[in-house]
Amino acid sequence: MRDASIAGVTVVRAAAALVRAMRPRQWLKNGFVVAPAVFAGHAFDPSALLRVGAAAGLFCLASSAVYLVNDVVDREADRADPIKRRRPIAAGEIPVGVALAAAAVLAIAAVALGAVLGRGVLVTLGIYLGLNLVYSLGGKLVPVLEAMLLATGFVVRLAAGALAISVEISHWLLICGFLLALLLAFGKRVPEVSHPTSRTPRYPAAFLTEAVTLLAGVTLVAYVLYTVAPDTQAKFHSKGLLITAPVVLFGILRYLFLLTREGSQDPTAALLADRPLLLTVVVWTALAGLIVARAGGHP
C-alpha cells in the first residue's frame, strides 16, 4: 500500500512538472489568434469565437511542444542560469525522453486537429512549428534574426485566426502585430543582459535600449496610422477606433517602465504581474471589440 502511494505521488509530481514545462501562462500569447475575429466585427459572434478559440487552443498545444523541445536543447545552459535552472527539464524533474515524447504527442495532436479547422489553419500550424524548430536548433543564437523569427510566429497566429473564420486580414493588422511582437521579442532580452548563457543571443545593452525605444515609437505610429487610414474608416464606417490610441500609448509606456525597472521579467510575466498593464489590455480589447462590432467592419 505504501509503495502504491509513493508511486501515485511520483506520477502526480511528474505530471505537474510536465504541465509547468508546457508553460501554460505563456498561452496568453495565442490571444493573437483571436484578434482577426475582433477586427472583423465578430467579437460577439459565438460561432466565429468558437472557431478562433479552437484555433488558439491548437496553438497552445503547438507552443507547448515547442517549449518542451527548446528546454531539452537548452537544458545544460539553463542549469547555469539563476532563473532558468528552475525549469523542470533543467532541474531533472522530467527525463529528456519523456519530454520529447510529450512534445511529439502535442505537435501531432495540434496538426491532426488543425485539419478539422481547414487547410489554412493546418498550414499555419505547420509553419509555426517549422519556424520554432529553426529557432530552437540554432536560430535563437543569431542576434536580430531570433527576434524576427519570434515576431513572425505572432504574424502566423494572426493569419491562423483569419483563416479559421475565412475573413480577409488587414495588412495594417499584420504590420502592427509584427511590430508589437518585435518590440516584445527585444524586450524579452533586456533582463538576460545581466546573466547571459551559451544558449541566449548576445546583445549590447545599449543596442537593446535603442531597439526597444525605436520599436515602441514605430509601433505606436503604425497603430495610429491604422486607425486613421481612409480604408480602415471606410470599412468600419467610423473614426471611433482612434480613441483606442491613448490606451495603446499607455500600454506601451507602461511596458517600457516595467522593462527598465530592476527585476523586470519577460512580457508575459510582466502582463500577469502588473495590474495596470493587464487592465490596459482588457480595456483596449473591450473598446476595440465594441467599436468594430457596432460599425460592422470587415478588415
Image (cartoon, grey):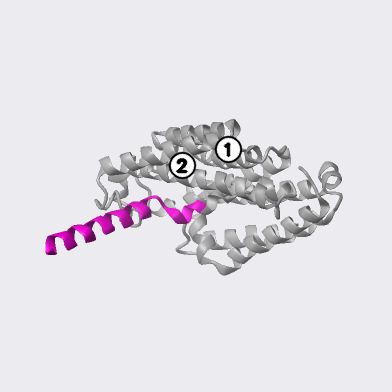
Q: Is residue 143 magenta?
A: no
Q: Relative to 156, is 107 on the left or the right?
A: left
**First in sequence: mark 1 or mark 2?**
2
The residue type indicated by label 1 comes to Leu
Residue plotted at (50% across, 32% down): 126
Residue plotted at (28% across, 43% down): 98
Q: Along the line of sight, which residue is nearer the eye, 299 or 175?
A: 299
Q: Along the line of sight, which residue is nearer the eye, 35 or 85?
A: 35
> Crowding at label 2, few (<14), some or many (≥20) Cα neighbours within 10 Å?
many
Q: Quadrant of residue 274?
A: bottom right
- Residue under pointer 2: 62
Q: Of the residues tagged 1 and 2, which is closer to the observer? A: 1
Q: Relative to 228, is 171 on the left or the right?
A: left
Q: Of helix, strand and loop, which one carries label 1?
A: helix
Q: Name the quarter where the C terminus is drawn.
A: top right
Give the residues drawn in magenta, as a range. Answer: 1-27
Identity of the residue furthest to the front in this view: 1
Where residue 74 appears, as percent x and y from the top left, is 33, 43
Q: Relative to 116, is 95 on the left or the right?
A: left
The residue type indicated by label 2 comes to Ala
Where residue 27 appears, as percent x and y from the top left, is 50, 52
- Residue under pointer 1: 117
Classified by dominant secondary structure, the portion drawn in magenta counts as helix
Could one spot residue 211 in this view of the protein? Answer: no
Q: Along the line of sight, which residue is nearer the eye, 43 or 202?
A: 43
Where residue 158 appears, as percent x and y from the top left, is 62, 42
Residue plotted at (72% across, 56% down): 289
The numbered dot on residue 220 is: none
